[in-house]
Every structure is written in structure tokens, then in C-alpha cells.
Amino acid sequence: MAVDTQIWTDIDYDKPGKQTGFLGVPQSTNTSGWATQFIPIVVVQNGQGPTALLFGGNHGDEYEGPTTLLKLGRWLQPEYVQGRVILLPMLNRPAVEAGTRLSPVDGRNMNRAFPGQRNDTLTGVIAHYVTHALFPLADLVVDIHSGGRSAHFLPSVNMHRVANERQMREMVRAAQAWGAPWVFIYKDVGGEGLLPGYAEGLGKTTLGTEIGSASQYGATMLRIAEIGVKNVLRLYGILQDGEPITQPDRPPRVVAADEQDDYIMAPVSGIFEPFYEMEAWVEAGQTIGQMHLLEQPFAEAIPVVARTSGMLISRRAFPLTRQGDCVATLVRPAEF
């Protein structure tokens, strides 16, 4: 299928075997009037079967995805595959190289840029290519995230609550096969244009994650990411490496944050002091932390109060906090 895009690539998505290469994204910079941003891509195809499309580095300060998919891309061979695997370990490569959530090229959030436009800034051009060239190929979409600099998260596989009940049940089934401790159903409170949300809207079986954060990046979180990706590929028969799906010690628990007030925003700017660790259950009206005012150091701290009841699945990692930043997220059990 021909796609009207500025991006070029030598990759042939229908060619059997293993290909490594780049998406070439044209740009013009202060140091080079004619320049290209190279986005790495791996495609492994063998025989007939579903296509899995996997992303890391959507946000540049979340390294669990790039590490997992770079390793998978080097390891994966055609004889292990029935169908097709497409890997983009650093979708937002400029942000990955800068260690920032937003692209340093245009200041945009890749995960708020979908579906993008052909004539757009660099971030939107990449989103447009993914939307029109890659999503149509995919049966399964995986977008690996973590809390990055700003949030601690219990390791979870995530999705929105979609209207299509069959699609919803299938996404929960795939998320449980991942083997992370939690399956987290969330709503958008930080804007529209998310990669997973757009893929869900196309009817794709779509999984996001929140695995670790900048200060939790380590062997445990990487194992959850690496084992989980392979588990899901095995579930759909795409990965046939002779290994079974790895079962966790405890079945994953499905939880949801369905209400706007489940996402607790800082009432003022200052230093956030949390009162509870993650997995704690808090009741509506309970004080979960307080804000210390930098400009009024001798004033009483401002309490941060929960408006709903639930378990703490995430909290702010970086203490310096601006008014309106999310400092905690509360979830409750969900049934499917």
C-alpha cells in the first residue's frame, strides 16, 4: 500500500527473513540545512501469521522499552517467528538521546501527536507514518512505557476501557499473559492523541505498560518487560522458540482508575511529601501527602487529600512539583 509520507526506508515489510534498517525522517536544523533523523527499525518475517508491532522510546526518559526491544531485535531470528514482528526500539529517538519526555527537536510529546500529519513537525511526521504505514499491517500493538522521571508505578500492563467488549476482553487476556503483577485500565487525563488510544480506536489488540521509572530501572523491571513481550508473542503463536509462556507466581490483578478524581493533582506548587507507599489503600477524604511551599517556608504545609477511595498504583517520583502535576493515582479492582 502506497503511503503519502515524507519518510523513506529501505525496509520491505513483505520480505521474508530478518531486516534491520532505519526510517529516514527529513529535517532542517541550525547545523545542517539538509539533514535526516534515523529511526531504527527491525522486521522479522517467516511464513503466515499475525503481525506484532512493538514500540519503545515513545517518551525519551523511559528506557525499559528501548533496552527490551534492542535486545529482542538482536536475538530474534526468522526461524523463531510464525508471522511478522516489527520493532521500533526508539520511536522518539531525539528524546531518547536527550533523556527527555518531549522531543528536543520540536518540544512535542510523541504520545499526544497521533494521528499526525504529512506536513508537520518531526514528531507529527513520525506519528503520521506510524498511523498510515504501520498500523494497517498490525494485528497486535505494544507500546512500552514506564513512569520516566516523574512517577513511580507498580509494574503494570495498561489499556483504555473500550466500547467493543470483545476487543476489551482480548486486550485483558493478552495483558494477563504478559505476567506483570497488575493490569491497569486507565483514562486520558493528560490530553488526547495517544499512540495506544489511536490503535485501540482502529480495533487493534493494544497493550501499553507502566514498568518502572527512572529510579526503578534495573534487573527486576527489565525482566518483567522482556519476559512479558515474549509471553504475548507466544500467546499469539508469533514467537515459536520452543519455550512456554512464563507463569508469574501470583496471577495478575485487574484494576481500574475510571474517575477523574482518581488522578490526584497537586493543589499548589512546592515539594511533595508522600505519606504512603504504593499498594497502600486510602479512603476518600484521607490526606495522602502534603506540599511544602518554597516561597512561604514558614507557612503550614498544604494537605493533599484523596477524593476517591482506592489503592495507590503510582505516586510522584520527583519531589519538586508544580501545581496541577499528578502526584498519585488510585485504582480499584475491576472484573472481566
Image (spheres, rainbow, N blue to C red):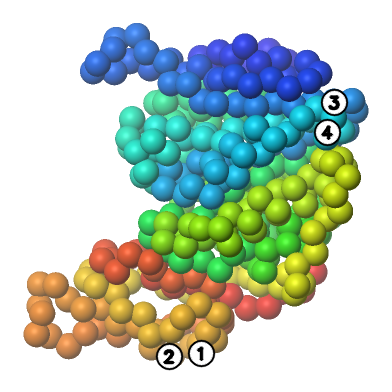
> Which numbered circle lies on residue 283?
1
User: Image quadrant for the C terminus?
Assistant: bottom right
> Viewer-nearest of labels 2 and 3?
3
Number of other residues with Cα within 10 Å of mark 3, as a class: few under 14, some 14 to 19, many 20 or more: many
Identify which amino acid the numbered label 2 is placed on: Gln
| Count of labels in the image | 4
Q: Position of residue 184 (x, y in %)?
A: 63, 65
Q: Are marks 1 and 4 in contact (CB under 8 Å)?
A: no
- At a point 63% along the width and 21% down the height, the residue shown is 20
Mark 2 vs 3, N-terminal side: 3
Identify which amino acid the numbered label 1 is placed on: Glu
Q: Disc 2 designates what residue?
A: 286
Q: Disc 3 designates what residue?
A: 46
Q: Is residue 219 left or right of residue 101?
A: right
Identify which amino acid the numbered label 3 is placed on: Asn
- At a point 59% along the width and 33% down the height, the residue shown is 88
Q: Is residue 312 left or right of residue 255?
A: left
Q: Position of residue 310 (x, y in %)?
A: 56, 82
Q: Disc 4 designates what residue?
A: 81
Number of other residues with Cα within 10 Å of mark 1, as a class: few under 14, some 14 to 19, many 20 or more: some
Q: Is residue 176 above or below residue 296?
A: above
Mark 1 vs 4, N-terminal side: 4
- At a point 34% along the width and 9% down the height, the residue shown is 34
Distance from the alpha carbon under mark 3 to that under mark 1: 52 Å
> Viewer-nearest of labels 2 and 4?
4
The foreground one among 118 and 158 is: 158
